[in-house]
Amino acid sequence: MYYSQQDLDNITKQLIKAIILLGAIFLVFLVISIFVANSVANQVGMLVMLVGVCIAIFFWGMYVNSVYAYYKYIKDLVTGRSREIQGLVKAVSDHPVYKDNKLFYYEVTIEEDEIERVLLLDDQKDWPKINTDKLYKFEIHENYVKDFHQIP
């Protein structure tokens, strides 16, 4: 099994640290802006607060949002229902693609009962090599691969 409760715990800790850092950034700029507004000028204090809010929004968009998306993804894989399918692997993408406007995945095209499907492998994990034209058993949640084994 490639995903476990430990993965969920690790990403939860990372998300909590990121949110605490985001709050600290906001709080530091709030304190500085209040001090500047009282000692220098109210307009300068407002400008400092505006810069702090912009930095916090930038930090949210560039870092916290992606950590939160990965947290939701891991939580779904660990706590959600999964099923097993068997399929002949037709192709595996060489480079990860950006899917669902959230995360990067490798696409694995399989043929299951003469129907082609695209499964998604998380690019954050180290997966073993998947050979094309071989039969595999996949454990999936929706179209996300949780685990796989080659069938001899």
Image: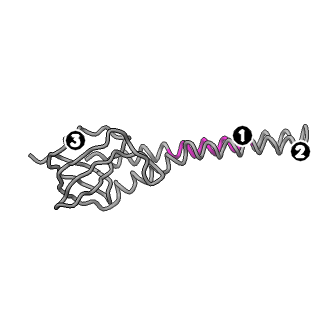
Amino acid type shown at disc 3: Ile
Q: Secondary structure at mark 3?
A: loop
The x and y percentages for residue 93 are 31, 43
Magenta range: 15-29
Is 151 positioned to the left or the right of 21 in the image? left
Give me the disc on residue 145: none
- Viewer-nearest residue: 131 or 84: 131
Question: How far apart, in angstroms, are the residues tagged by discs 3 and 1?
Answer: 49 Å
Q: Is residue 141 above or below residue 62?
A: below
Q: Secondary structure at mark 1?
A: helix
The x and y percentages for residue 38 are 89, 42
**Crowding at label 2, few (<14), some or many (≥20) Cα neighbours within 10 Å?**
some
Q: Quadrant of residue 25?
A: top right
- Viewer-nearest residue: 86 or 125: 86
Q: Residue at x 91, y 37 (%)?
A: 40
Give me the disc on residue 42: 2
- Find disc 1 in the rendering and name its residue: 28
Q: Residue at x 31, y 37 (%)?
A: 126
The reply to whether the C-beta atoms of the residues labelled 2 and 3 are less than 8 Å apart is no
Question: How far apart, in angstroms, are the residues tagged by discs 2 and 3?
Answer: 62 Å
Amino acid type shown at disc 2: Asn
- Viewer-nearest residue: 67 or 24: 67
Q: Earlier in the sequence, mark 2 or mark 1?
A: 1
Instruction: Tell me, yes or no, whether the highlighted magenta stretch contains residue 24.
Output: yes
- Camera-side mark, 2 or 1: 2
Instruction: Tell me, yes or no, whether the highlighted magenta stretch contains residue 109.
Output: no
The x and y percentages for residue 103 are 44, 48
Amino acid type shown at disc 1: Val
Give me the disc on residue 130: 3
Q: Quadrant of residue 129?
A: top left
Q: Earlier in the sequence, mark 3 or mark 1?
A: 1
